Image (cartoon, grey):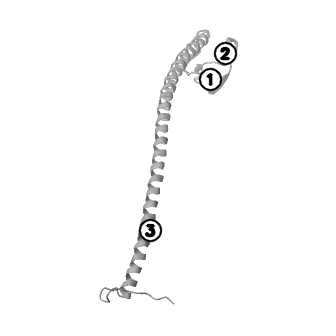
Amino acid sequence: MKSTINLLPKEVLIKSDTQQLASKLTKVAIAITAIFVLFVAGLVAFMIFVNNQLATTQDKIAQTKNQIRALESTEQSMLLVKDRVQKIQLIQNLNSSATQITDLDALLTALPASVLFQSGKLDVDRSRVTLKLTSSQDLAFVFNLVRELDRYQTVVMKKFDFNPAAGYQIEFETY
């Protein structure tokens, strides 16, 4: 059997209720301290994680900005090329229009005086001509002339009107 010897006077002795309370408070303080230490460790780990994410995001932003700068210079080059191509096409279209004007002039100069030129429209790849004719002989002559000139790959009749008082009106497109 164990016996304890206490040499302190009874007035100085701590009561057992107070001693139990102190023991419980010590345990609670140790638990709170442990929770606080774990919380601080978690907070530090979270801050390190967020800092790494921030650094990664900033690197990605820098890379994206560099790519944007590279693409901007490429875009400027592409716009210059596009502008040059448009100017080249404009010059080529002018040459094409000159050929169409020459072809139309050859057609109109070969027409007899009884055939009236009413309108003409020149586009980049086609021309549209409207003629007024007084007789069917003029009509046959125009068809033969267009075929014999051999300047057009395709001729499409767009309009064919006949009025006994006015005669024939034809409109055709040439390609």
Of the pair 118 and 174, the residue shown nearer to us:
174
Of the pair 144 and 148, the residue shown nearer to us:
148
Residue ID for mark 3: 34
The earlier-in-sequence mark between 1 and 3 is 3
Q: Residues within 10 Å of mark 3 (few under 14, many from 20)?
A: few
Circle 2: residue type? Val
Circle 1: residue type? Phe
Q: Which mark is residue 172?
A: 1
Occupied quadrant, residue 168: top right
The earlier-in-sequence mark between 2 and 3 is 3
Q: Quadrant of the C terminus?
A: top right
Q: Secondary structure at mark 3?
A: helix
Q: Are marks 2 and 1 in contact (CB under 8 Å)?
A: yes
Nearest-to-viewer mark from 2 and 3? 3
How far apart, in angstroms, are the residues tagged by discs 2 and 1?
10 Å
In this rendering, the answer to whether 129 lies above or below 17 is: above
The earlier-in-sequence mark between 2 and 1 is 2
- At 40% from the left edge and 73% from the top edge, which residue is drawn? 29
Q: Residues within 10 Å of mark 1 (few under 14, many from 20)?
A: some
